[in-house]
Structures are given as structure tokens and as C-alpha cells.
Image (cartoon, rainbow, N blue to C red):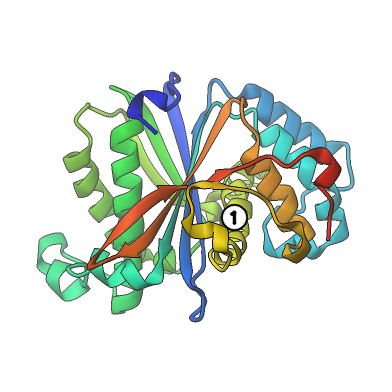
Amino acid sequence: MLITDLPSLRGPSIYIASDYAGEVKNDQYSVYSFLFCDLANSKSYFQDVSSLRRNSSLGYRRMNFKNLNDKIRLSHIENFLTAAGQIEGVLLNLVLNKSIIPILDESSYPDRWHDIFDLKGNWKDKVFTRMVRIVHFVSVLMGGLLKEGQNAYWISDDDNIFSNPDFNKDVGNIIGRLTSFYLKQRPGELGLGTTAIDEGDLIEEDLTGICDLVAGTLAELIPYYSTLPQWNKGDQKTFFYDQLREKTQIIGYWLSQPNAALMRKTFIFEPHEESFKMRILNLERPKLDYFKWS
């Protein structure tokens, strides 16, 4: 994918939502999902998701991958994702094989950063390293997608990297310094928050919920694909429904749909010799005759 393939985020303010999966000890992959939403040009999404919540049994139930075992949430997931497809923006998913993470994070430990950033929090190495990785991803993506003068507001899942006020200050300090490095254009206002700031209208919850649904799906989908002979034969993949749960199939199918306002791209990083290689996951849309739930 070339930089010219990315959508143009034209509005004055951009919401950046994010969520993550694959943090369980035995998981082979870590997944990071980032949604860039052009607020001014995504009115159809906000209207439709608001209407869905008002006029159905979904109500104010939060949409996330774990809770899709609830029948009411599952019954509305396709309508929720159809609304999400109208977002003017881009959904970028980064999937990292955990065997390459030490290569990426060799210098990201807090004792090496403490004096540079005047850290306030009592960070454990693992949590701090994960935070730096996420902040780097956000900063690089902002550098590639934002335009001169645009406001950007990063809303993350209420994660352990935001678990107390000192952590929040440290994250804000580090992303402020890193964005000044990666952003070549002058930004407008930059803001940082978590879903804890949601005022009850679920705007922030729903945007991060899209990331949660996708990250959870990829954390289940990629390990399954990686066991198949087809995995090393090229980028094009197809669905193998017999082993995938219904919710994984629904969201995976949505990820495969082209020609929507919301661009969806997934990049997978795998070990290669003493470094790593990147591949793009291209989900092939199945024929409807074969698209069935397990």
C-alpha cells in the first residue's frame, strides 16, 4: 500500500481511537488497532449508530469482542459494523508476532527514559515497554495522516497504561515529544484521553469499540491462519469457517469488504532471520453460498 492510497482526512478535527488484544501470556500475537475518524465528514455514521441504539434492543450496551457472547449484542453486530463502514477515515491494524517484540523494544525500558522524560509513574518494564510501543505507533500514524492545522484527539481504551494520574502524565509527555519529532506539519490542538471521559452518549466508547471488535477478531483469526499450509504461500487468504466462531466470521467478513468510506488495512510483522518482515493481510470475500456460521 502506497501513502497515496490512504484516504484524505479533510475535516478540522480527527478522533484517533485505539484498542489492543493478544496480551494473554500464551498468545502468539499482539494486536494494535487504530481508527482515524474525520469527525466533520462522518455524520452518517454518528446518525446511524445513534438511531440503532435508540430504536433497538441494543440500547446502551457497549460493543466489544468479549461481550458478543451476549445474544442481543450479537444480533446487532452487523448493523453496528455497517454504520461503522460509513466513517470517513482509516482503520489500521498492526499484528506483531511476539517473538520479534524484543527486537523492536530493545531500548524502551523506563530506566533509560526516566531522565529524558522526567517520568512520574512507577512503571514496570513490561507495561512501560508496551506503552512506548503504542505511543510510537500513534505518533508515526499521526505523522502520516494528519494535515497542517488539524486537531487530533487520541481516545484509548481504559488500559493499564492509563491506570493512574502519573501514568497519564507520562503518556502525555512522551507522545507530545514524539509527535513533535514525527509531525512535519504544524498541528492544531492535540488531546489525549480514555473511554473514561465518555459522557454517556457512547461516542468514545463506540469508536474504541470498533477497534476492540477488530483487535479481538484478528487475535483469533491470525493464529488460526498461521497454522495452515496456505499461510506461507502469499498474502491472499480465504476464510475457513469450520473452526471460527460466529462473531469472528461476522467481523472478519466486514474487514474484507471493499469500497466503503472507512479504509481497513492489516499489517502483520513476522520474524525473519535476525530481524522481521511485514506482510499485508488481504481477506478474500467468500461467496455467499459458502458464508455460513459454525
Q: Is residue 105 visible?
A: no
In front here: 118 or 288? 288
Indicate the quadrant containing the N terminus: top left, top right, bottom left or bottom right: top left
Q: Secondary structure at mark 1?
A: helix
Tell me the crowding category of disc 1: few under 14, some 14 to 19, or many 20 or more residues within 10 angstroms, Cα based. many
Q: As drawn, which residue projects farthest toward the left? A: 115
Identify which residue is drawn at 83% across, 37% down.
Answer: 54
Can you give x and y, in whole percent of width and height, for residue 146 in the image? 34, 29
- Image quarter (top left, top right, bottom left or bottom right) of the C terminus: bottom right
**Which image quadrant is residue 127 in?**
bottom left
Q: Is residue 147 left or right of residue 72?
A: left
The location of residue 96, given as percent across then percent down, is 41, 61
- Residue drawn at x 44%, y 23% is 9
Is residue 270 among the parts visible in the rendering? yes
Q: Is residue 165 above or below residue 183?
A: below
| Residue 116: percent from left, percent from top | 11, 62
Tell me the residue that label 1 is attached to. 212
Residue at x 21% of width, y 48% of height: 178
Count up the numbered dots: 1
Left or right placement of residue 89 versus residue 71 in this view: left
Picture quadrant of residue 183? top left
**In front here: 160 or 227?**
227
**Of 157 and 189, the residue lying toward us:** 157
Q: Report the amino acid beneath label 1.
A: Asp
Seen in the picture, residue 60 relative to 86 is either above or below; the reply is: below
Q: Position of residue 94 (x, y in %)?
A: 43, 52
In the rendered structure, the answer to whether residue 80 lies left or right of residue 120 reads right
Please name the residue shown 16% across and 75% down the image: 111
